[in-house]
Amino acid sequence: MMDSPLSASLSMEELHEAWPVLSIDERLEGFRLLPTAVADDFFLALSAREQAELILHLPTSERRTWVRLLPPDDLADLVQAVEPEEADAILAQLDDASRREVNVLLAYAEDDAGGLMNPRFARVRPDMTIDEAIGYLRKQAREKVETVYYAYALDAEQRLQGVLSLRQLFQAASDKKVADVMHHDVITVSENTDQEVVSQLFAEHGFMALPVLDEQNRMKGIVTVDDIVDVVQEEATEDIQKVGGMEALEAPYFEVGFFGMLKKRIGWLLVLFLGQMLTATAMSSFEGAIERAVVLSLFVPLIISSGGNSGSQASTLIIRALALGEMRLKDWWRVARREVLSGLVLGFVLGAVGLGRIVLWQEVSGAYGEHAFLLGCAVALSVLGVVTFGTLAGSMLPLVLRRFGFDPASASAPFVATLVDVSGVVIYFTVASLLLRGTLL
Amino acid sequence: MMDSPLSASLSMEELHEAWPVLSIDERLEGFRLLPTAVADDFFLALSAREQAELILHLPTSERRTWVRLLPPDDLADLVQAVEPEEADAILAQLDDASRREVNVLLAYAEDDAGGLMNPRFARVRPDMTIDEAIGYLRKQAREKVETVYYAYALDAEQRLQGVLSLRQLFQAASDKKVADVMHHDVITVSENTDQEVVSQLFAEHGFMALPVLDEQNRMKGIVTVDDIVDVVQEEATEDIQKVGGMEALEAPYFEVGFFGMLKKRIGWLLVLFLGQMLTATAMSSFEGAIERAVVLSLFVPLIISSGGNSGSQASTLIIRALALGEMRLKDWWRVARREVLSGLVLGFVLGAVGLGRIVLWQEVSGAYGEHAFLLGCAVALSVLGVVTFGTLAGSMLPLVLRRFGFDPASASAPFVATLVDVSGVVIYFTVASLLLRGTLL
């Protein structure tokens, strides 16, 4: 072991720290150096992809322990992360009952409550006494239940009758009935509820777990809040990447291959590039004006980008408000009014600053000629118009996308900026033509 | 009640649905119409701000029940959400012991583990038997412990010796000792650990709760995963809003006042507007070139925005990777190499498309004159340069910000775009001057 980069006594934290930069052989070696007491925890904390990699590099004789350590929902994730023939090798390590459980879970879409749920939950009968219920839970915990936080009271047809937290169970007098103590009004989700809706319920209510029911109200499993932390993070990452103007990656930065990464980026860049070409077309119809007053062209980037920036702000605000359920489609009129007003105020401030800058610069250097003040007014008015239009367009676009069933987050900052740029060119040269006719033009 | 918009029998779901659009009087009325059995749950699921509003509008005689329903960590949040004199009115409803607990929590920064933690946790002694431990937990649950998921084994000085989950407790034989069953290698956080670090630990390990220790390793409380869902969502919202080019809001869209919202937006818009003025300055030094070949000005928006878009992508990617701990500062060289290569490939593709468009348009309309091909080459080369520079600058800026202690998310899409726009102008006109000297120029 002297030559090994990993010392013989390795802590979980040390290995965790080094993990991202280790090769698979080093990972295996490090994993085997962990004290047995913590190797379990370490393994369970890995991502499905990393667990699969480790298992598939272990000799077949060692695989079973690790495969069987995983609860069915994590196993289903792991199976989805590997090739089909590797999946078979992993499923072969399971007993028949567990394999059936995993296969049932694999039938659900990954982003549904069914795909997130764990079919092993703590159950009691409504007519048990509290003491009987505690005894029954101890028995279940010894067998295979992962999460004992709530106990679910089911009738003989597996239909959910009520729920009680361990705290309530512990609080209640020993001889009371479960039915007397339990909550009857339970918030549940169906197998097909989207994970974004599920995580919204967790965020609003602060639950530790939510029961999943099928169409006949039979209880199929629970979604636990620890899995929701990952969901919330993933959904936010997707939204942030889309807002930044690319397709969402499905893995950490360094784990996505070079060409895979390019593929996620080039699509939007091309669309935006083609869209942006319209600015050249728009400008070419004002080529005469530019020829007569080259000074006009100097302010094109300034004016169109102020529209793009205010549009990015507005679209980002609305995208996030929609994702968090703070706003609905039917609020569009309220949003539109508010954003037009915001755009007017923001545009007025920026326009005034722009006018001031041109007047000041003219005083200092005389760069803009005798009509500097008029030029400044044209710039200021254009900024006012472009910012107001940008703010309105940026705020409405996510709502329009949602209305037609697309992801609002596709109204990315660069997308809104491009859209507003083209209109910005038209607004600017129109305002300038009207205002400067007979002087500069 | 006939005239009331709310019917006499109101379900929790109905009220929850209507909540955002109700006035405070309607909220109070609705809340009082809830069946007592679910009013608790409804109240607990509200945000701290909403709980405070409701309590402060109740007659003093009814306040106590609701104030005392809240655990100390939620009470601390609530007190922070109201005015100082209102806080006193709320704290006056508590018994002395609880008021002391809340006051201790108020001393922590809101974004630290100390500010998130609940001081009421389930404790056992290492030398208890399993049966004694279960009995002791039942007693604690009856008093005031909120979350019974893990039991923490403390010595006489309140130092943490180990932890065991309820599942382990339930699994173990009745006469075993706690110390024989518990985990000794416990992951803990300190009172001052930042909430972003805490939530990263939850996301990586899938814990239900984490113990918080002071400097002497005495256990002060637990952070539970249900609070972390909110933290993850808040942090993501802040990052998304910053990426969109504004200051982070601290409340939902409709709850922020019109002028409060403007204040969050105008700052960055002004900074960007002032920065963007440099494009006018940069372009004015190429005024001569534009006068000689107005056609050059047509492609300015196209070229600079392609740099801005690729820069936005890159910065967003890196901002998120940093926030999720997928990448560290010391990876900067690896990132830079990868992003320069990406930029070259992306720029090459976009440049080729640009060249093709100009050549094609020339064939169709003859709009660009006899030197259209050379013009196309100048545009293509500029796009290559600008996209490569934009990608590199966009990816490095968040790392530089982090290095100097700023929030990487301030490297917003509009900020990067503005930065790259100015350099884009310089790159474009320099390339054009070199390539078109003696022909167009």
Image (cartoon, coloured by chain):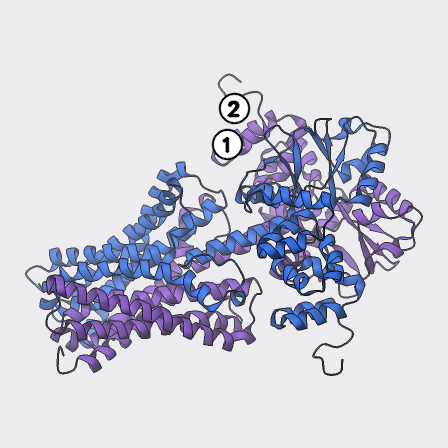
Chain colours: A purple, B blue
Reply above or below: B281 against B2.
above
Across and down, in percent, residue B373 comes to: 16, 64
Q: Residue at x 67, y 65 (%)?
A: B57
Which residue position is annotated with label 1?
Answer: A18
Across and down, in percent, residue A24 comes to: 52, 33
Q: Are marks 2 and 1 in contact (CB under 8 Å)?
A: yes
- Mark 2 belongs to chain: A
What amino acid is found at the position of numbered circle 2 in the picture? Answer: Leu
Q: Quadrant of residue B380?
A: bottom left
Which residue position is annotated with label 2?
Answer: A6
- Residue A244: give its label: none
Judged from this view, the residue extending furthest toward the top is: A2
Across and down, in percent, residue B138 comes to: 83, 41
Q: Quadrant of the C terminus of chain A?
A: bottom left
Looking at marks 2 and 1 on the same chain, the residue that comes earlier in the sequence is marked by 2
Q: Residues within 10 Å of mark 1 (few under 14, many from 20)?
A: few
Q: Residue at x 37, y 57 (%)?
A: B413
Name the residue nearer the viewer: A22 or A106: A22
What amino acid is found at the position of numbered circle 1 in the picture? Answer: Ala
Q: Is residue B354 left or right of residue A136?
A: left
